[in-house]
Amino acid sequence: MAPSSPASHPHYDRLIAVARSLPPLRVAVVHPADAVSLEAALASAALGLIAPTLVGPRAKIEAAAWEAGADLSGIAIVDAPHSHAAADAAVAMALRGEVDALMKGSLHTDELMGAVVRREGGLRTSRRISHCFVMDIPGHSQSLIISDAAINIAPTLEEKVDIVQNAIDLAHALQMPAVRVAVLSATETVNAKVPSTLDAAVLCKMADRGQITGAQLDGPLALDNAIDAEAARIKGIVSPVAGRANVLIVPDLDAGNMLAKSLTFLDGAYAAGIVLGTKVPVILTSRADSEPARLASCAVASMLAKAGRERLIKAVG
């Protein structure tokens, strides 16, 4: 469902405005071989969000530009014979420091991520790789970060630690003034028969002990009492997170994917997708994404890259 008007998504307007104040992010756009993916990259470039390098079959990219009525003058193109080669070339560019982020074009997500997660020559770090949607929901007072709806199918407790920390770090990069993490389940009470409630309780205790940092955590929480203060009050849940969460950690990919898509297609929300735990941000877009969501994905990557540079400077200094 398309949102009623751009004005109903002010959170993305803020993100894009902040990102436009930064230098354009050097982005390898991987296999932009159709009009939709190419237009997304060029629109972000026109706003000054990114400085794109198009990586893929030159003939297909030029045909997509002709279909879109787009001018590629001044846009760098790295010729690669097919989508797998384009993904490999883009990852190599990131490792050489030639680009600051990757952006998915018209190839399948698993083709791009296969090159990203490769143990030799990929973009892995010590963190588990995870995905976040930054959601802008009509009428909601703040952005919502949802993780993980695209990469980790059935994460273990150990993997959830990194998923939570990645999401917290993203929230700080997006300059959220307070990060409140709800670890979701079907119920707000710990139940040994529902493993996600046990994981939630352990994650919260790990945060209490400093093993997860940078946010307030609570869980298990059901979705209603995580984001609705009245629902939390009725259930008698008293915590700094309940009813006010701005980061939602789902138990598995199915739950996250259905939650994000329900908000998008039933409530007119925008979903900006980003991959975390990699050496550079990876912008994941879908052909079904609206233009504001694609622009916001680039803005999120730009702010994430800025936060990474600042951490590096602080560590060196």
Image (cartoon, helix red, strand yellow):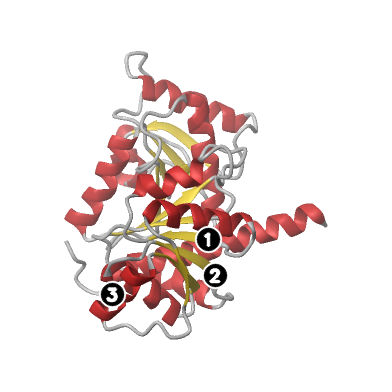
Describe residue 164's horizontal placement relative to residue 264 as left or right: right
Marks 2 and 3, Cα distance to the nearest angstrom? 25 Å
Residue 67 tag number: none
Q: Position of residue 122 (x, y in %)?
A: 55, 45
- SS at circle 1: strand
The quarter of the picture where the N terminus appears is bottom left
Q: Amino acid at mark 3?
A: Ala
Q: Amino acid at mark 2?
A: Leu
Q: Is residue 203 above or below residue 146?
A: above
Sequence order check, earlier mark of 1 and 3: 3
Q: Position of residue 210 (x, y in %)?
A: 65, 33
Sequence order check, earlier mark of 1 and 2: 2
Q: Nearer the viewer, residue 172 or 140?
A: 172
Q: Nearer the viewer, residue 241 or 52?
A: 52
Residue identifier under label 1: 101
Describe residue 269's horizontal placement relative to residue 103 as left or right: left
- SS at circle 3: helix
Residue identifier under label 2: 25
Residue identifier under label 3: 63
Q: Tag 2: Cα neighbours inside 10 Å, few (<14), some, or many (≥20)?
A: many
